[in-house]
Image (cartoon, rainbow, N blue to C red):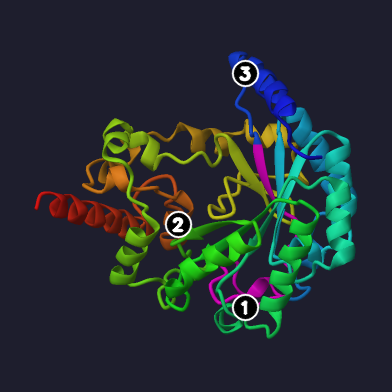
Amino acid sequence: MVIDSRSVKNYAIRQAERRRAGEMIAGIITMEITFRCNLRCRHCYLGPYTYGDASKNRELTTDEVKGVLDQLIEAGTFFVDFTGGEALCRPDIFEIMAHAGKIGLFFGLKTNATMINETVADKLKDLGVSGVHISLYGATPQTHEFVTEIPGSFEKTISAAKMLRERRIRVRFNTTMMKCNVKEHKQIEALANQLNASSNFDPFIMSKVGEPGSGDLIRLDDEDLKTLVAERNWVPDEEITAKSSVESHIICTAGRKRCAISPSGEVIPCTSWRLVMGDLRKRSFSEIWNGEVARKVRSVTAKDMPTCVSCEFVKFCARCPGFVDLEKEGSGLSGPSSVNCRVARAIKEVRDARAKENLH
């Protein structure tokens, strides 16, 4: 089911009516359909415990996933993003997507694309996938495969992107920026443009679940971070910055307008913030979404984060409670994240340097 303007308008009208009635709607859901993956990416926050079939026995069954999707459409969900691990590792993924489309859900796919061939691309087109986000970690096989640790993965990923674009399926490359690929962001963007795809660059690297500080070895250093901010022009307009509220920078929409579901049916605010709000094998989605933990997540305001509110970098920040939680377990509801702080500082320093240059 491809998103069209009429469908979006009708959905917006229905959502407005439900919100006027006092409902809190989870419009977008990220569904981790499996933790299994065929790559070994160095930076993956899920960690090595997800590789192989160890987690397979805990996954929701096909019928359980369909049942969850039925609950989501009733709860007002509009869009489901299927991800993993590697979502295509599940042999029933197309049956699940078909059910999502049948009941009126729009859906996308996040993938490393190495399992996409002509047949899979045709199937995704026939099922009406709204778009495919592909992980790409370098403009060359050497860089990309240094990250994935699987020879041949670069060629498979690029080939898949070409197949999808030939079928007019929207493609976006998602690139996590790290020490090994920071010099290649312009080449990655050029490659995306060549394939008529879009590109997105993310300077945030989370620690692995249960391993605080594990991302430090591959994160950008301060100088590379500032160079990236300047070259990508991630400096917000001064007028926009002045008008933006502090709360908009430190209060996340996770658990408020969207959430995620783990392979075993745990409802969490997002894939980064793995605070368990409830178990879909024990309670319905609506019960969890309106339950005690979810309400606690939504009750947090800027007043609960005095350190962030008083920070000189707050207007340049995009605080992620998931990052905070991974750094300091159980602290996602309050407090700063060192990862977000570093990026906010880099943005402000680049902006200040530009302002100083303009004075001369």
x and y percentages locating residue 152 in the rendered image: 71, 83
Q: CA distance from mark 2 to mark 1?
A: 22 Å
Q: Sequence order check: which comes first, mark 2 or mark 3?
A: 3
Q: Sequence order check: which comes first, mark 3 or mark 1?
A: 3
Q: Amino acid at mark 3?
A: Ala
Q: Predominant secondary structure in magenta?
A: loop
Q: Are marks 3 and 1 in contact (CB under 8 Å)?
A: no
Q: Amino acid at mark 1?
A: Thr
Magenta span of residues: 28-51
Neighbours of disc 2 within 10 Å: few (<14), some (14-19), many (20+): many
Residue 75 horizontal side relative to residue 184, left or right: right
Q: Sequence order check: which comes first, mark 2 or mark 1?
A: 1
Q: Is residue 74 magenta?
A: no
Residue 254 horizontal side relative to residue 332, left or right: right
Callout 1: helix, strand or loop?
helix
Q: Amino acid at mark 2?
A: Phe
Q: Residue at x 26, y 34 (%)?
A: 242
Callout 2: helix, strand or loop?
helix
In front: label 2 or label 1: 1
Nearer to the camera, 207 or 241 = 241
x and y percentages locating residue 68 in the rendered image: 80, 42
Question: Residue tagged by mark 1?
Answer: 148
Q: Is residue 32 magenta?
A: yes
Question: Residue tagged by mark 3?
Answer: 16
Question: Residue tagged by mark 2?
Answer: 323
Quarter of the figure that contains the N terminus: top right
